């Protein structure tokens, strides 16, 4: 017994995407409302149909009460959130499917709204600065073992994993560049993308190093905006405005000793250099009865380009350690590659809404309405961020 | 394609500014920091099954025993991985780059790793697997943190 093919995504919607801070004077809750209304309209549903909210990463500030009262949801029957951060993005739709499969709710909205006008995720682990400055969350006994060394941003932390991947497997900066360049190629064909200029290998190697081996173009964008996804029962999905996109499998979690991952750096050696996704990937494939070979398009969470390479390995698109050469061989290119990756441009070049744009793109691919449409796409993989546990993923099918 | 990624006039690694370093120990981590102030590196080991745990915490992750003994370390280490922070993420560190946050594995601890800065080295000289030795950094009167240099 599982949630396989019990629920379907029937609506997706988004606000415009903005560079960091430029969504002001809208509020985050206002953008969440606009995205939900757009997703409901896409589905041919109304707020009166919504009875559940399935979130992640402290979406809506970690509290749905104000949103429900503001939007006038008639009765909330399910309200829950995956713990952790961006790791739960894809899994929030799995959480919605679980709510629906259990009978606790019938029509569930997953969403992310983001405004980085004041705080920036890029320095989310920074220590408190000079008096009056406040860069980040409060200190903790555990952070005492990372902060004094100046590890203050996720990019610096993932750079440590990338450096060891290069050491163990001979991965090159050219391989990271291929992730960034291929996704930029996808992004520039889309009106929604914040990045509209092609990226060359020269541009990449001339860009400033931020945290070696990572340069500016290995880092995702810093954005504002909101994306919402509506999931309902497979029965109900048959009669709505859009062709149903089935939730065929979803999993979240990870090894306990992956734990806080990048902020403690004591993960077991056998999977230190990974995306943390391996056990989640195995459960996803088991639930679906599929493997990487069945996937037509992969929307892989790309906060930092090397983590796309490690997810390609962890989901079995190539052997462990071969990800760099796999992308260098052109395998992730739209139109010519064996597995097109991040056809929307991803967090690196379209917009960073903590991974929900990946769900939206997967749905559009399976409807056959994507801008960079993969011909006859029937199976789409979506992943949440390589991060502290839980990581998560979602397999959608037509 | 060769890709030199360090500038020609490469500086020595620097350190994050002392003003940014403050500790908030709890009952489990305070012993580590108390010892550090005395320039002793200690790692807690389970009194029941002998597993080292880090950071210090309430339970052994193998046998869930709470009691530990603090085992003093030699100060030798091996570089497990690192990054070079070339770009200041905050104005407060603009005079402190490049600095090198490193993950240092301690021998004979079952793989315990410390996060600490590398010193007395240029970024291009750093190699994963290199032998390191501990150098204590007295940050404030009551705060000392470990750093490492090539052995």
Image (spheres, coloured by chain):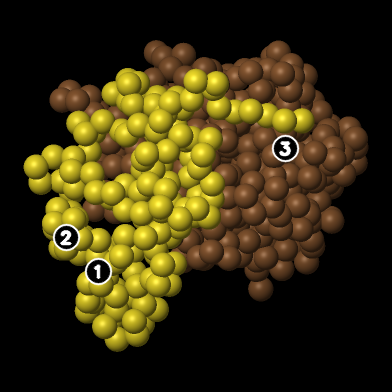
Chain colours: A brown, B yellow
For the question of whether residue A261 can be seen, the reply is no
Mark 1 lies on residue:
B72
Q: Residues within 10 Å of mark 2 (few under 14, many from 20)?
A: some
For the question of whether residue B11 can be seen, the reply is yes
Mark 3 lies on residue:
A175
Residue B143, horizontal then vertical, whole percent: 15, 46
Which chain is home to disc 2? B
Residue A113 versus residue A145: which sits nearer the camera?
A145
Mark 3 secondary-structure assignment: helix
Mark 2 lies on residue:
B35
Chain-order first, disc 1 or disc 2: 2
Mark 1 secondary-structure assignment: strand
- The residue that appears at 87% across and 44% down in the rendered structure is A338
Q: Which image quarter is the N terminus of chain B in? A: top right
Q: Distance from label 1 to label 2 (Cα)?
A: 9 Å
Q: Is residue B119 left or right of residue A104?
A: left
The answer to whether residue A275 is above or below residue A282 is: above
Evaluate if marks 1 and 2 touch, with contact meaning CB atoms under 8 Å apart.
Answer: yes
Residue B48 circle label: none
Residue A145, horizontal then vertical, whole percent: 30, 51
Residue A375 versus residue A167: which sits nearer the camera?
A167
- The residue that appears at 39% across and 78% down in the rendered structure is B62
- The residue that appears at 37% across and 60% down in the rendered structure is B76
Q: Is residue A359 left or right of residue B17?
A: right
Instruction: Kindly indicate whether the residues beneath marks 1 and 2 are on one polypeptide chain.
Output: yes
């Amino acid at each position: 017994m599982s949630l396989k093919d019990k629920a379907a995504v029937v609506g997706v919607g988004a606000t415009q995407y903005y560079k960091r801070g430029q969504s002001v004077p809208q509020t985050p809750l206002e953008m969440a409302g606009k995205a939900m209304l757009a997703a409901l309209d896409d589905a041919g549903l109304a707020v009166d149909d919504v009875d559940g909210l399935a979130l992640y990463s402290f979406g809506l500030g970690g509290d749905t009460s104000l949103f429900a009262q503001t939007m006038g949801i008639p009765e909330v029957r399910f309200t829950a959130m995956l713990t952790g951060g961006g790791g739960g993005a894809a899994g929030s739709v799995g959480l919605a499917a679980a709510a629906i499969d259990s009978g606790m709710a019938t029509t569930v909205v997953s969403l992310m709204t983001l405004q980085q006008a004041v705080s920036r995720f890029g320095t989310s682990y920074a220590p408190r600065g000079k008096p009056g400055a406040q860069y980040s969350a409060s200190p903790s006994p555990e952070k005492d073992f990372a902060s004094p060394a100046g590890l203050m941003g996720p990019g610096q932390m993932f750079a440590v994993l990338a450096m060891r991947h290069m050491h163990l497997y001979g991965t090159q900066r050219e391989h990271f560049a291929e992730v960034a360049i291929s996704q930029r190629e996808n992004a520039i064909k889309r009106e929604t993308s914040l990045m509209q200029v092609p990226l060359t290998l020269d541009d990449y190697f001339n860009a400033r190093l931020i945290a070696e081996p990572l340069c500016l173009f290995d880092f995702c964008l810093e954005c504002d905006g909101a994306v919402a996804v509506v999931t309902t029962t497979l029965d109900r999905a048959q009669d709505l405005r859009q062709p149903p996109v089935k939730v065929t499998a979803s999993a979240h979690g990870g090894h306990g000793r992956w734990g806080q991952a990048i902020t403690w750096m004591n993960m077991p050696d056998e999977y230190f250099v990974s995306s943390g996704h391996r056990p989640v990937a195995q459960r996803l494939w088991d639930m679906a009865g599929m493997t990487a070979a069945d996937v037509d398009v992969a929307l892989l969470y790309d906060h930092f380009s090397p983590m796309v390479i490690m997810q390609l390995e962890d989901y079995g698109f190539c052997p462990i350690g071969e990800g760099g050469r796999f992308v260098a061989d052109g395998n992730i290119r739209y139109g010519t590659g064996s597995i097109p990756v991040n056809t929307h441009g991803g967090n690196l070049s379209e917009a960073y809404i903590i991974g929900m744009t990946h769900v939206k793109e997967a749905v559009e691919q399976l409807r056959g309405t994507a801008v960079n449409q993969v011909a006859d796409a029937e199976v789409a993989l979506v992943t949440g961020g390589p991060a502290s546990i839980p990581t998560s993923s979602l397999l959608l099918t037509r | 394609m060769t890709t030199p990624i360090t500038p020609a006039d490469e500086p020595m690694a620097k350190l994050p500014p002392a003003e940014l370093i403050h500790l908030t120990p709890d009952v489990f981590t305070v012993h580590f920091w108390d010892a550090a102030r005395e320039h002793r590196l200690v790692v807690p080991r389970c009194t029941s099954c002998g597993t080292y745990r880090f950071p210090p915490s309430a339970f052994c992750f193998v046998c869930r025993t709470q009691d530990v003994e603090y085992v003093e370390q030699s100060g030798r280490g091996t570089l497990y991985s690192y990054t070079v922070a070339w770009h200041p993420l905050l104005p407060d560190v603009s005079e402190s780059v490049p600095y090198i946050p490193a993950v240092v594995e301690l021998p004979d601890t079952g793989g315990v790793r410390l996060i600490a800065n590398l010193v007395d080295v240029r970024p291009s000289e750093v190699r994963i697997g290199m032998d390191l030795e501990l150098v204590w950094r007295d940050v404030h009167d009551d705060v000392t943190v470990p750093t490492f240099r090539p052995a």
